Every structure is written in structure tokens, then in C-alpha cells.
């Protein structure tokens, strides 16, 4: 059977038989791939730990009719081990890979792959507060999928902002003319935070007060659930408390 190599993030795994696993992978060049890793659940497996969720690996695969077969795996980013030590990071990473699974298909999506790898690396290294990293990833991943929200001009008629009304069903902020009666308003600083998360302006995002972070997280969650038909099952389990940046705990 034909062989090929590609870098991949492990999105999720399922047990198969007594010793195998089915992997759902987001690859750098081949999009989303489902493959079998034979014998990885045995203690003697050479690459079982490299094929856990959130891990990034250089894989050699053999093409199959319905499922490809992993024949070699070399670790690139062992992010799963670091993420699993922190519950907040672990729940956020689960929401990320679930979103990636829903937003990518079999065709190549290099930008989605690079975005996910960068977000998992950031979680593992505690580069930014967990909820901000997750919210930024979700907004940017949805934008790459064609659902970019507007936090400047009116999402409906294009009138330049700033605007204080946000309607997730319409795609972001809306002007007074387009806003239905009773539309809730948000603080300008919250809109600025959402725009910063979308563009990756971490200096502005991390300086946002806890109230703005909490409100922005609620808006991001609603926007994500609206655009994904069945929503994200992992999202309700994510801690949405505003956080300060904390260093990773030393390993024993």
C-alpha cells in the first residue's frame, strides 16, 4: 500500500480491539485523517505515548481503504503531557481539538493546522491566561472557516463603528439602526478585547479587567455555539473564571 509522511495533531482517539486505537488527526498537508495505530495500547509499544490527544508528531502512514495505518511516529511537540497537568488547560484543549474536528475536512487546511499547533503550544507553556488563549483560538478558527466576526463596522450594513450592540446571529457588532429593540449593550472595552483576541493583540487582551474578560468569554461561547450546528460538548466544562497568567508547576 502507498506510504506518505505528514505532520499531525492528534484530535481524539478511540479504542479498537484489545491493543489498537483509531486516531482522528489534523495533518499539515492532508487535512483531517482517520488512521489506525496498531498495538499502541500495549505497554511495550514504541510510540503509544506519542499518539495521545494534543500531541504533535511526524507520522508515516500507509493508505487504506477506509482507515490509514500509522507505521512510524516521531514526536514534534509533546504538549499533551504538560496540558494534562492543569485541569483548566486540559478542558480548554479539549474544546480546541473538538472545534478543529468540526471546522476541518479531508482537504488540506494549513492555516487551521498551524493555528491549532500554536494554541496547544501556548497552553502547554502557559504563555497567556487559559481562557484568553481559548477565546482567541475559537474566534480565529471560525474566521479561517469563513465566519469572521466584526467588532468594528456594523456586521449587517457596514456603518463604521464603534458600536455597543452585539448580535452573534448577525456576525458581531451592529449599529443602532440595525439593532432590534431590547438588544443588550456591551462596554466599549469589551468590544476592544474581542477585537484584540481576534487579531492576537495580547498586550491589550491581558490588560483587560476581569469583568471584560468574563463578558467576552460569554460572547465567544455564544458565537461558537451558534455557528457549529451541534455546538461543542467540551465548552460547558471549561472554566470561565478570569485568570492571571501562572507559571507551570515544576515537574517532580
Image (cartoon, helix red, strand yellow):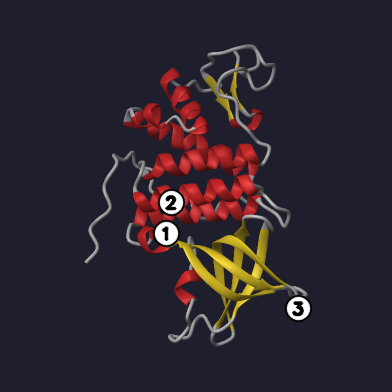
The numbered mark at residue 69 is none
The numbered mark at residue 121 is 2
Residue indicated by mark 1: 79
* Gap in angstroms between the C-alphas marked 3 and 1: 31 Å
Task: Please rate how many residues cluster around mark 3, counting C-alpha atoms within 10 Å: few if below 14, some from 14 to 19, many from 20.
Answer: few
The x, y position of residue 251, in whole percent, is 24, 63
Residue indicated by mark 3: 1
The answer to the question of whether label 2 and label 1 lie on touching residues, with beta carbons closer than 8 A, is: yes
* Gap in angstroms between the C-alphas marked 2 and 3: 34 Å
Is label 2 or label 3 in front?
Answer: 3
* Kind of element beneath mark 2: helix
Q: Nearer the viewer, residue 236 or 113?
A: 113
Q: Nearer the viewer, residue 156 or 137?
A: 137
* Kind of element beneath mark 1: helix
The x, y position of residue 243, in whole percent, is 31, 40
Q: Residue at x 50, y 26 (%)?
A: 195
* Gap in angstroms between the C-alphas marked 2 and 1: 6 Å
Amino acid at each position: 500500500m502507498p506510504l506518505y509522511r505528514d505532520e499531525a495533531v492528534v484530535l481524539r482517539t478511540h479504542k479498537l480491539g484489545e491493543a489498537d486505537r483509531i486516531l482522528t488527526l489534523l495533518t499539515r498537508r492532508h487535512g483531517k485523517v482517520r488512521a489506525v495505530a496498531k498495538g499502541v495500547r500495549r505497554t511495550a509499544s514504541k510510540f503509544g505515548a506519542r499518539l495521545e490527544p494534543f500531541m504533535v508528531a511526524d507520522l508515516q502512514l500507509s493508505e487504506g481503504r477506509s482507515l490509514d495505518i500509522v507505521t512510524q511516529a516521531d514526536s514534534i511537540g509533546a504538549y499533551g503531557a504538560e496540558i494534562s497537568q492543569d485541569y483548566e488547560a486540559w478542558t480548554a484543549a479539549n474544546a480546541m481539538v473538538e472545534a478543529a474536528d468540526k471546522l476541518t475536512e479531508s482537504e488540506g487546511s494549513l492555516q487551521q493546522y498551524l493555528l491549532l499547533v500554536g494554541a496547544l503550544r501556548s497552553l502547554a507553556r502557559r504563555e497567556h491566561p487559559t481562557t484568553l488563549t481559548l477565546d482567541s483560538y475559537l474566534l480565529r478558527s471560525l474566521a479561517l472557516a469563513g465566519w469572521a466576526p466584526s467588532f468594528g463596522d456594523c456586521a449587517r450594513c457596514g456603518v463604521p463603528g464603534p458600536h455597543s450592540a452585539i448580535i452573534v446571529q448577525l456576525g458581531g457588532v451592529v449599529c443602532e439602526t440595525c439593532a432590534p429593540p431590547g438588544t443588550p449593550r456591551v462596554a466599549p472595552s469589551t468590544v476592544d478585547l474581542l477585537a484584540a483576541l481576534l487579531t492576537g493583540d495580547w498586550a491589550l487582551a491581558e490588560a483587560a479587567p476581569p469583568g471584560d474578560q468574563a463578558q467576552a468569554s460569554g460572547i465567544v461561547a455564544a458565537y461558537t455555539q451558534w455557528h457549529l450546528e451541534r455546538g461543542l460538548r467540551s465548552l460547558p466544562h471549561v472554566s470561565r473564571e478570569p485568570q492571571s497568567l501562572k507559571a507551570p508547576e515544576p515537574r517532580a
